[in-house]
């Protein structure tokens, strides 16, 4: 220690010391192979790519000693059955959106996104500095998994509609392809929520079996070609203000990892969050422009529709809290944190953003 | 390879192979010590802490083989002279805000933040997926440094004013403690920009030697006690819509690192970005509440003031581009990327955010 301190204190900037600890190091870095079942098809290169990014970073940080092989949805496990496979130890982990598992327990939604919940920054703060991860832990423990944040889509779009939504009444009877928890909210307003796998949405929209469908955002939506059969493209996707992606890891497998690899996995997942957010924000603007040029009609949800959905969502939170202790515990923590976040973001962040967007709109107007 | 493939394809979830590569590994992970000069005092635990976080992650990812010792501003190098020290190789790297060096060249500002520039998400996208890092590289090459993103403050506050700003005219003659590049913008509107070190701001404000001062955001500002002598707390800090923090590394030192450690350093810096953003968003809301309870008067800059500043900023960009080739090259790339980002964020992201903030305001109103 003395020598190290002296070197550190001397002017010598970088000191390469002789290696004394090779055997310890080799023990710390054994060769390990993991299998990761993604919930996403490879064709969704951004969201699926987040899982591959984790694998790439894990390899890069361990000189290829720790390797994770990622399988696309359906390759070894169906996309929505990956949690079962992790629990059973058939695979070591799944790269997924935790809200896919709200059928098991709606508490999963908080690890993904919830209607009128927190945006990317706010959820990131809750999970990493606000105690969110700790609050979710006892819940994930009951499934024998550890959840690591590994990507985000940002605020999503509200989806594709065959006809315009002008009033709250227009929601009544609307056959809308939308995921679990948000479906419960919309059901209160008369929407008939439909669960349809990605590949089946287009024909259902085309035939009119459904009236509307939501998917992700411009970049991912574009691949499915919805604008040709349901031209009204609504925003915002208030049920997904910033979808957090997760690496759900079998708890025993996590504990078996050498400590160094646990750190590596944590870092790789955080890296994937930065990377995925950066990529989505690069590809979405270009895709949106192409969609609009190709006939998509951009529409904001009318304010009264948004307000009715908001009230319905708050009712669902209260009702679910009454029957589910995990949900209640997490919702109360989440709700209180969201409250402080919104108060702060309303000030500097939102006034800054809103002003620059307004100036851009003004400049566009002037150019016309 | 055959055996690995078989193992990967078999049901065996994690396969721990015998270690074959210990000598190679030991070579890949020598003991290295670096010294990092921070531009921040330790008392600013969030922003200074980002540098320490990098050091912690580097140690965690290398089993303590690669260690970075972080020194606070002034400890071995004055806070604003750290780039010189990195160039000279006196230290290996500096954790800083690149815009501190606009006196050398205003092009540094793009690596930090610029007036009416991109927010955290947008800048993150530009740097990591939009080609920003590549566009900045030839510029940083001329200083023999590599810049790694390592933290962000989010949108900052507009600072503390002894009297209210009601019109553009109120800016004329205003003695305002504000950093370099934004000072040039405000000079166009008659502001007398002042450069005063952190510790000297409070007495200057108290005596009325200056009329106003900007610092960071609620959490950092609170420590300096400005609300007692300049109660009007303006927002947003349009000159810092999302200050990126940087780890500027001596290029030769970077190249001397074993490849594994280069990857580790990159990951550790990205980790610090997630961590710092999460922490700022946790501590700022609480600090803002305390400041307001303690007498701070929150004020938005009036729209005409914002617009005059916006026009002045665009003039400064054009003027600087006319005389500085690096600046022109980077600004043109930055500006085009910003344009696509604003178009996209105006849609889903801002409509989502603005709606939830409006609902919160409505709920607060109803509770009163």
Image (spheres, coloured by chain):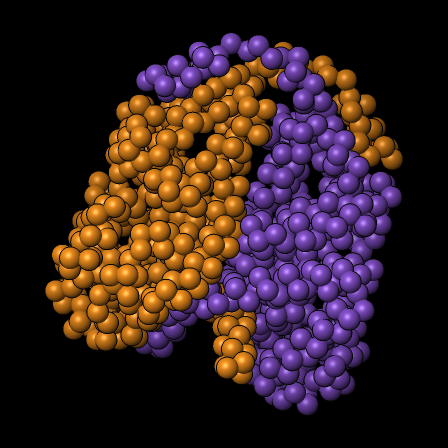
Chain colours: A orange, B purple
Residue beneath the point at 78% across and 41% down = B250
Q: Is residue B359 visible?
A: yes
x then y, percent, for residue B34: 76, 35
Q: Quadrant of the N terminus of chain A?
A: top right
* Quarter of the figure with residue B295: bottom right
x then y, percent, for residue B176: 74, 76
Residue beneath the point at 83% across and 28% down = A6
x then y, percent, for residue A156: 37, 58
Closer-to-camera residue (A190/A10) = A190
Does A325 sit above or below residue A248?
below
Does B87 sit above or below residue A305?
above
A226 sits left or right of A151 in the view: left
- Count of numbered tags: 0
Residue beneath the point at 55% across and 54% down = B125
* Quarter of the figure with residue B214: bottom right
B26 sits left or right of B10 in the view: right
Closer-to-camera residue (A198/B187) = A198
Does B26 sit above or below residue A174?
above
B37 sits left or right of B13 in the view: right
Does B56 sit above or below residue A176?
above
Closer-to-camera residue (A191/A13) = A191
Residue beneath the point at 38% across and 62% down = A291
x then y, percent, for residue B366: 32, 76
Closer-to-camera residue (B339/B165) = B339
A270 sits left or right of B259 in the view: left
Q: Is residue A116 visible?
A: no
């Amino acid at each position: 220690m003395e020598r190290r301190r002296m070197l550190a204190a001397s002017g010598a900037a970088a000191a390469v010391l002789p290696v004394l600890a090779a055997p310890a190091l080799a023990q710390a870095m054994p060769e390990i192979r993991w299998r990761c079942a993604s919930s996403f098809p490879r064709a969704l290169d951004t969201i699926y790519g987040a899982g591959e990014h984790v694998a790439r970073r894990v390899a890069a940080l361990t000189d290829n000693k720790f390797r994770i092989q990622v399988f696309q949805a359906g390759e070894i496990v169906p996309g929505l059955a990956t949690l079962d496979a992790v629990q059973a130890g058939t695979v070591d982990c799944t790269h997924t959106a935790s809200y896919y598992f709200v059928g098991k327990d709606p508490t999963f939604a908080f690890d993904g996104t919830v209607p009128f919940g927190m945006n990317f920054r706010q959820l990131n703060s809750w999970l990493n500095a606000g105690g969110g991860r700790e609050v979710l832990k006892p819940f994930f423990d009951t499934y024998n998994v550890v959840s690591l944040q590994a990507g985000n889509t940002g605020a999503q779009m509200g989806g594709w509609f065959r006809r315009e939504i002008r009033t709250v009444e227009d929601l009544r009877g609307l056959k809308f392809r939308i995921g679990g928890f948000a479906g419960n909210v919309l059901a209160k307003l008369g929407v008939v929520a439909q669960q349809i796998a990605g590949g089946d949405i287009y024909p259902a929209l085309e035939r009119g079996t459904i009236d509307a469908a939501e998917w992700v955002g411009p970049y991912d939506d574009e691949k499915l070609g919805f604008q040709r059969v349901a031209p009204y493209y609504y925003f915002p996707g208030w049920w997904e203000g910033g979808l957090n992606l997760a690496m759900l890891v079998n708890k025993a497998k996590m504990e078996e990892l050498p400590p160094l690899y646990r750190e590596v996995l944590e870092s790789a997942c955080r890296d994937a969050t930065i990377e995925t957010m950066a990529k989505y924000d690069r590809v979405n603007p270009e895709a949106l422009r192409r969609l609009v040029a190709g006939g998509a009609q951009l529409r904001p949800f009318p304010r009264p529709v948004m307000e009715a959905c908001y009230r319905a969502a708050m009712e669902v939170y209260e009702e679910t809290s009454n029957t589910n202790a995990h949900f209640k515990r997490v919702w109360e923590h989440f709700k209180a944190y969201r409250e402080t976040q919104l108060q702060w973001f309303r000030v500097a962040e939102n006034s800054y953003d809103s002003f620059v967007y307004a100036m851009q709109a003004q400049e566009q107007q002037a150019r016309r």
